Image: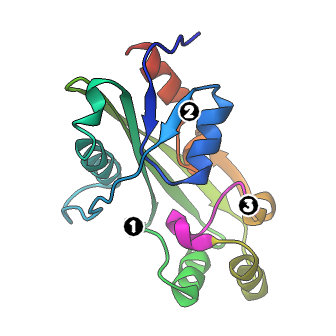
């Protein structure tokens, strides 16, 4: 059992990450700082996720002396193409059309910082989508918010319930935080 001895800062505006942290029975506060999420183009998907998580952690260097700071970044990779957050309806439609009837990988990089110590890791999950019709894609985009989600979808939303055939790996990783690995890492802190 993880016995929390230090305050935890979750540096994420993601409601899904916040929900997962609450479900883990962790006491935390959300603190946000703007961070440039660009990355070198020669990085592999797992390296990108960790690179951005560590950039976010670096923005909290002064805050990590008295608290544990948790940062994360989730990306979707389809045929070596990184699918970030969609810019608009057209972009979201393009992404979901690519993912329809195929499989892709979801990578989440996580950094835990405290008192000059930084521990980073990632998880990867393979997600298999059933084919989606143009009407289903339009319905999802119109009725749910795909614009703050990598790959233009949330597995916990309608689309995840009706279109995701199966996952290989951590379900919570696809939501944006591999809770199993995070818990194990916190035990070591």
Give the x, y percent position of residue 120. Answer: 32, 34
Neighbour tally class for label 1: few under 14, some 14-19, many 20 plus, Cα within 10 Å: some
For the residues bearing labels 2 and 1, Cβ distance under 8 angstroms: no
> Which quadrant is home to the N terminus?
top right
Residue under pointer 1: 82
> Is 92 a magenta residue?
no
Q: Please identify the quarter of the rendering in which residue 132 is found.
A: bottom right
**Taking 90 as reference, is 41 above or below it?**
above
Question: Which sits earlier in the primary sequence, circle 3 or circle 1?
Answer: 1
Observer able to see residue 9: yes
Please name whichever residue, 30 or 72, is drawn nearer the observer in this view of the structure.
30
Residue under pointer 2: 179
Observer able to see residue 171: no
Between circles 2 and 1, the one closer to the viewer is: 2
Give the x, y percent position of residue 182. Answer: 48, 29
Point 21% across, 66% down: residue = 41
Give the x, y percent position of residue 79. Answer: 43, 67
Q: Please identify the quarter of the rendering in which residue 188 is found.
A: top left
Disc 2 and disc 3: Cα gap in Å? 19 Å
Disc 3 and disc 1: Cα gap in Å? 21 Å
Residue under pointer 3: 157
Helix, strand, or loop for circle 2?
Answer: helix
Q: What's the colour scheme?
A: rainbow
Please name whichever residue, 54 or 135, is drawn nearer the observer in this view of the structure.
54
Point 58% across, 87% down: residue = 89
> The magenta stretch spans which residues?
146-157
Question: Which sits earlier in the primary sequence, circle 2 or circle 1?
Answer: 1
């Amino acid at each position: 059992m993880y016995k929390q001895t230090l305050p935890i800062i979750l540096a994420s505006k993601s409601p899904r990450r916040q929900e997962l942290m609450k479900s883990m029975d962790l006491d935390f506060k959300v603190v946000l700082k703007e961070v440039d999420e660009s990355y070198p183009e020669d990085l592999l998907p797992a390296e990108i996720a960790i690179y951005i998580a560590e950039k976010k952690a670096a923005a909290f260097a002064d805050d990590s002396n008295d608290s544990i700071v948790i940062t994360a970044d989730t990306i979707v990779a389809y045929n070596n193409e990184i699918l970030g957050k969609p810019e608009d309806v057209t972009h979201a439609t393009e992404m979901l059309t690519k993912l329809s009837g195929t499989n892709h990988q979801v990578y989440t990089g996580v950094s835990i910082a405290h008192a000059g110590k930084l521990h980073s890791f990632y998880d990867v999950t393979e997600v298999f989508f059933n084919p989606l019709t143009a009407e289903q894609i339009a319905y999802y985009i119109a009725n749910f918010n795909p614009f703050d989600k990598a790959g233009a979808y949330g597995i916990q939303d309608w689309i995840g319930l009706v279109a995701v055939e199966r996952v290989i790996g951590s379900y919570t990783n696809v939501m944006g935080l591999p809770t199993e690995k995070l818990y194990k890492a916190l035990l070591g802190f």
